[in-house]
């Protein structure tokens, strides 16, 4: 309809054609001399017509753009982490093949530092202490952590207080823990010997006795590290479907049978995970030894990591210390891969 008058389809078509011709004429008038008006009309039709070309974003191109966007945010932090890990690791390996005291120019000696470890009695003693500590500590923390998690998973009074009291030592720094341990286990004025004196029991050397020192360090480390295994086990226990326990109870299973046939198989992946984590942590124990005994008495509490620290930073034998550090890394890697293989062979989805 135009000015109140109905317009037929033919007139509409004619009017549309007239508008297109007028637009082409205007464009042709604006073009420089010598330009074909037909080509101009074709250009307008190609630019504004229904068949105009539009940018097409394929799925692959979208993924590439998304990945580039993500890496643009993650790249700075990734470069910093790689720079603080790969570069020191590579440099330490180069140092492990040198004789260098940190001051004079380094001298290449090949694999002599690694061969020296096989003849070093102090290194073998540190390895024995670390292996014994690991073999004795890891099973204890697994069993005790599972037992405490089962106890804290029950509905009892003051359960929040018990969980908080167990978690507090985990967030205490190793330095503060070592200082506190020195006050408690001091041979003359420590709280532990004062309690023994009140009870008319013989006093102990604790950290000053070469036969007791590793047991005391294990007790201190258990106090600080036990909460981790308890928290992991507690989360796994709360994730066990209650339908399974109710079905076992309806079938006549007692508490021990429920634990043996329902709870324990469900905790197998968590047990492998905690075992790997605790093994790696114990092999790298250092801060507690540094703040309590400094490897003494007479090297009785010297671990592999403390041996590395002593060789590199106290004796300025950077090459030998780096070689021991790489040996520890290789041993830790082999043990971890072995536990991974055991979990996969046993079809335990721990990772």
Image (cartoon, grey):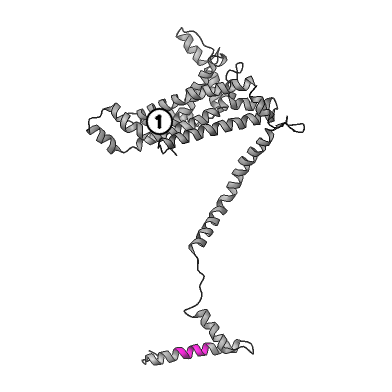
Q: Residue at x 60, y 44 (%)?
A: 82
Q: Quadrant of the N terminus?
A: bottom left
**In the rendered image, is residue 312 in sight?**
no
Q: Is residue 124 left or right of residue 280?
A: right
Image quarter of residue 99 = top right
Residue 239 position, x and y percent, is 35, 38
Residue 30 position, x and y percent, is 60, 87
Give the magenta-colored segment's residue range.
16-23
Q: Quadrant of the C terminus?
A: top left
Name the outermost residue toward the right. Answer: 104
- Tell me if residue 21 is in the magenta stretch: yes
| In this view, 94 is above or below 309 | below
Q: Residue at x 49, y 88 (%)?
A: 20
Residue 131 position, x and y percent, is 53, 24
Q: Is residue 60 left or right of residue 231?
A: right
Q: Which residue is mark 1?
A: 163
Q: Residue at x 63, y 27 (%)?
A: 308
Foreground residue among 51 and 288: 51
Q: Residue at x 57, y 89 (%)?
A: 37
* Badge count: 1
| In this view, 236 is above or below 71 | above
Residue 89 position, x and y percent, is 63, 38
**In the rendered image, is residue 225 in sight?**
yes
Q: Is residue 152 left or right of residue 191?
A: left
């Amino acid at each position: 309809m135009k000015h109140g008058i109905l317009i037929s389809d033919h007139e509409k078509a004619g009017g549309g054609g007239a508008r297109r011709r007028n637009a082409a004429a205007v464009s042709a008038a604006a073009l420089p001399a010598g330009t074909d008006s037909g080509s101009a009309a074709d250009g307008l039709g190609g630019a504004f017509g229904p068949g105009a070309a539009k940018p097409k974003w394929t799925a692959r191109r979208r993924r590439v753009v998304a990945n580039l966007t993500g890496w643009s945010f993650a790249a700075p932090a990734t470069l910093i982490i790689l720079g603080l890990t790969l570069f020191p690791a590579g440099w330490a390996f180069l140092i492990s093949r040198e004789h260098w005291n940190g001051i004079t120019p380094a001298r290449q000696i090949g694999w002599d530092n690694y061969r020296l470890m096989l003849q070093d009695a102090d290194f073998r003693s540190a390895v024995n202490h670390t292996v014994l500590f690991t073999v004795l500590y890891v099973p204890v923390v697994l069993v005790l952590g599972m037992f405490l998690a089962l106890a804290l998973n029950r509905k009892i009074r003051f359960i929040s207080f018990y969980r908080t009291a167990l978690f507090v030592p985990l967030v205490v720094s190793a330095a503060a823990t070592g200082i506190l341990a020195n006050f408690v286990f001091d041979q003359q004025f420590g709280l532990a010997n004062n309690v023994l004196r009140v009870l008319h029991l013989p006093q102990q050397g604790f950290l000053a006795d070469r036969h007791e020192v590793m047991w005391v360090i294990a007790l201190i480390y258990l106090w600080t590290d036990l909460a981790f295994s308890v928290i992991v086990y507690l989360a796994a226990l709360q994730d066990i479907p209650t339908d399974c326990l109710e079905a076992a109870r309806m079938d006549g299973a007692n508490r021990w049978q429920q634990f043996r046939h329902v709870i324990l198989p469900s905790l197998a992946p968590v047990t492998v995970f905690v075992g790997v984590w605790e093994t790696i942590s114990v092999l790298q124990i250092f801060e507690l030894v540094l703040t309590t005994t400094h490897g003494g008495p007479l090297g009785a509490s010297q671990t592999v990591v403390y041996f590395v620290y002593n060789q590199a930073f106290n004796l300025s034998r950077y090459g030998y210390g780096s070689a021991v550090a790489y040996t520890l890394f290789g041993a830790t890697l082999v043990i971890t891969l072995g536990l991974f293989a055991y979990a996969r062979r046993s079809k335990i989805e721990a990772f």
